[in-house]
Image (spheres, rainbow, N blue to C red):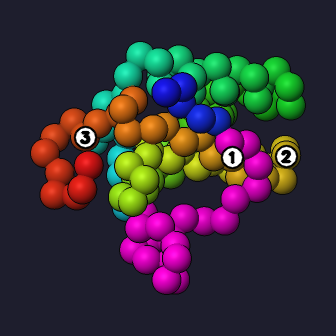
Amino acid sequence: MEPAIDIGRVNSPPLGRAGKAGPRMVRVELRDVTLSARARATIGDAFLQISRRYGVPYERLKRAVSGRIWVNLERDTLNFRFEVPELEADMLLTIPGEHWDYRFASPSQH
């Protein structure tokens, strides 16, 4: 499955349960996960497209992602969320479970 790229305004991810129907989200550090080659290429391509289309420096997009990575435990997705003030929006990149894994053993459901 091709990693999905969703771009647009999003709310901050919840910690734990976001109401009865909300997903369970856990914050992770980039150093704690590994990404497939396809996922890394998709993220790089997304940053390049955003940079070219909206004039946002590529390196600034890369820095904006750090510390804003979440795992959706119910869907087994890795979610990169970052703010792009030039667009007055938060961006979301969602990586399906088959394109990422924990670097170390994790007690979660992955």
- Type of residue at label 3? Tyr
Pointer 1 and pointer 2: residues touching (CB < 8 Å)? yes
Q: Mark 2 points at which residue?
A: 87
- N-term-proximal mark, 1 vs 3: 1
Residue 60: tell me if it is visible. Answer: yes
Observer-nearest of 54 and 17: 17
- Type of residue at label 2? Leu
Residue 65: x and y in percent read 55, 42
Residue 63: x and y in percent read 57, 37
Residue at coordinates 70% horizontally, 59% vertically from top-left? 10
Q: Nearer the viewer, mark 2 or mark 3?
A: 3
Q: Is the magenta stretch mostly helix, strand or loop?
A: loop
Over which residues does the magenta segment extend? 6-25
As drawn, the residue found furthest toward the front would be 1
Find the distance from the CA under tag 1 to the CA under tag 3. 23 Å
Q: What element carries label 1?
A: strand
Q: Name the residue under label 1.
A: 91
Residue at coordinates 41% horizontally, 16% vertically from top-left? 37
- Type of residue at label 1? Met
Q: Mark 3 points at which residue?
A: 102
